[in-house]
Amino acid sequence: MLRVSRKEEILKRDELLGGSFLFAFGLITFLLSLKMPIGTFRMAGTGMFPLILGILLMVLSGAFILKFLFQNRGEKFKKEAPIESSESSIRLILFLGTMAMATLFFNKLGYPIISFLLMASLLRILGIKRWGINITISLMTAAGSYLLFVKLLSIPMPKGLLGL
């Protein structure tokens, strides 16, 4: 029988904590979005997007936690090459910190600037190191989401510094 190593035990604990932390983050997003006007799907308010994102984050992280808890219950945990837990923890902290900063400055900087900065930061955290690709994807995503949400769907977003 294989014995579970200390590194593997730490990795299991970190994955469970990460999933739980993301669930809590989704719950907080959901609860805070209820304080904003939600509107309807035809005439969405400013709280609709964070409400849907919070629900989606809770569902996905809840599914991850349940799968993790019930996966291979009778077998010992075995991974070929575990990811260093400190690296994944740093990425998780950077990811959530970036989301918190985007939320904090959303009204001051406005939707176009925040969506660009958020996308550029998240791509960098996820491993896209080439700035040309990062900026191109971020600009395309920010412009596309601006056209979709503000122009096509007429969802009121903070204008911020650019006044868009």
Image (cartoon, rainbow, N blue to C red):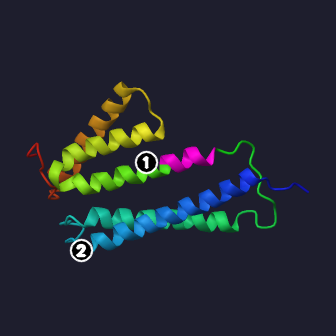
Quarter location, residue 142: top left
The part of the chain drawn in magenta is 84-91
Label 1 environment density (alpha carbons within 10 Å; few <14, some 14–19, many ≥20):
some
> Vertical placement of 157 versus 90: above or below?
below
Task: Point out which mark residue 35 bears.
Answer: 2
**Residue that appears at 35% across and 66% down:** 29
Quarter location, residue 116: top left
Q: CA distance from mark 2 to mark 1?
A: 26 Å
> Vertical placement of 30 versus 3: above or below?
below
Q: Can residue 68 be seen here?
A: yes
Looking at the rendered structure, the secondary structure element under dot 1 is helix
**Residue that appears at 81% across and 62% down:** 75
Whether 70 is among the magenta residues is no
Task: Point out which mark residue 94 bears.
Answer: 1
> Vertical placement of 22 versus 99: above or below?
below
Whether 87 is among the magenta residues is yes
* Of callouts 2 and 1, the N-terminal one: 2
Main SS, magenta residues: helix
Observer-side mark, 2 or 1, equals: 1
**Residue that appears at 71% across and 42% down:** 81
